[in-house]
Amino acid sequence: MRTAAIVPAAGRGERLGPGRPKALRLLGGAPLLVHAVRALARARGVSLVVVAAPGPDVPAVERLLADFEWGADVEVVPGGESRHSSVGRALAALPADVDVVLVHDAARPLAPPELVEAVASTVRQRADACVPVVPLTDTVKEVAADTVLRTLDRSQLRAVQTPQGFRRAVLAKAHAWAAEASAEELGAITDDAGLVERLGIAVTAIPGSEEAFKVTRPLDLVLAEALLARRRADGAR
Ligand code: CTP
Ligand code: MG
């Protein structure tokens, strides 16, 4: 089985505030995207990484990524207006011999390679689709305007991370559906596994990693800098 990874990196990063597109913002001196590609390329069995970059930045991202020795082939395609379309475009660029696909946000730069391997091996061994999940720490309530409607049972809820892993045919079928679906049909589906669930295909959950958190708001970047500094200090010891 040949495993490839797709990196949706074409978002603007509006919640992070003004500046370069989020994937190109710096963490420890290197763009978030470089960290994310490294985590994937370091995982055993990932032989190709396809990045969906913001359209105008494709040439610059190609030059940026060409500067590294990855241990995997790395390609860049232009992303789309939505995360779904960015993933769909990268999926369309995969060679025919790829049969397992991981999808990993550029915005999760510090996901450990062990997590990437755990997701990939779950798909290779026993699942059509696999997501890493972590328990919630806050109490969660449903609220309309300023009125609390109800408290959800937190013990049943999980936050979902990336990389998410799929048999290629399953992911392709899900994205073929998404490409034709209306905004109403897509509803609140924000991830690839959500599309697969919509087709009625089972998704397997495995334990995620706190370190695979998503850089969304400015404070997340502060946490990422601190975690990276700790890793570098541990590595130097
Ligand atoms: N993404 C993408 N194409 C889009 C939108 C998002 O490839 N049209 C990617 C982002 O680059 C990111 C991942 O999807 O790596 C997760 O999305 P998110 O965290 O929402 O990133 P942004 O959309 O960039 O951030 P924001 O929503 O704050 O603008
Ligand atoms: Mg977004």
Image: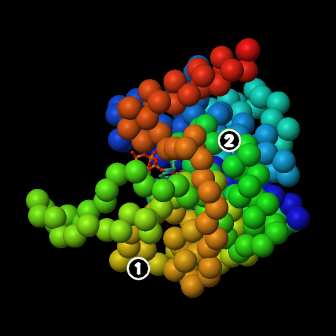
Q: Residue at x 62, y 81 (%)?
A: 201
Q: How busy is the neighbourhood of tag 2: few (under 14 within 10 Å), some, or many (20 plus)?
A: many
Work out whether residue 155 or residue 12 is closer to the camera in this orientation and state it: 155
Above or below: residue 138 compared with residue 12: below
Q: Quadrant of the N terminus?
A: bottom right
Q: Nearer the viewer, mark 1 or mark 2?
A: 2
Which quadrant of the view contains residue 171?
bottom right
Above or below: residue 31 compared with residue 177: above
Q: How busy is the neighbourhood of tag 1: few (under 14 within 10 Å), some, or many (20 plus)?
A: few
Q: Position of residue 130 (x, y in %)?
A: 66, 66
Q: Residue at x 51, y 63 (%)?
A: 191
Read off the residue under disc 2.
112
Work out whether residue 86 or residue 217 is closer to the camera in this orientation and state it: 217
Colouring convention used in this rendered image of the protein = rainbow
Q: Quadrant of the C terminus?
A: top right
Q: Amino acid at mark 2?
A: Pro
Above or below: residue 58 compared with residue 82: above
Element type where label 2 sits in the image:
loop
Q: Could you tell whether 116 is left or right of 193 in the image?
A: right
Work out whether residue 64 or residue 233 is closer to the camera in this orientation and state it: 233
- Of the image marks 1 and 2, the number of the one nearer the N terminus: 2
Q: Position of residue 72 (x, y in %)?
A: 83, 43
**Residue, far bottom:** 200
- Residue 185 circle label: 1
Q: Position of residue 192 (x, y in %)?
A: 56, 65
Q: Across the whole image, how many numbered discs are drawn on residues?
A: 2
Q: Residue at x 41, y 79 (%)?
A: 185
Q: Amino acid at mark 1?
A: Glu
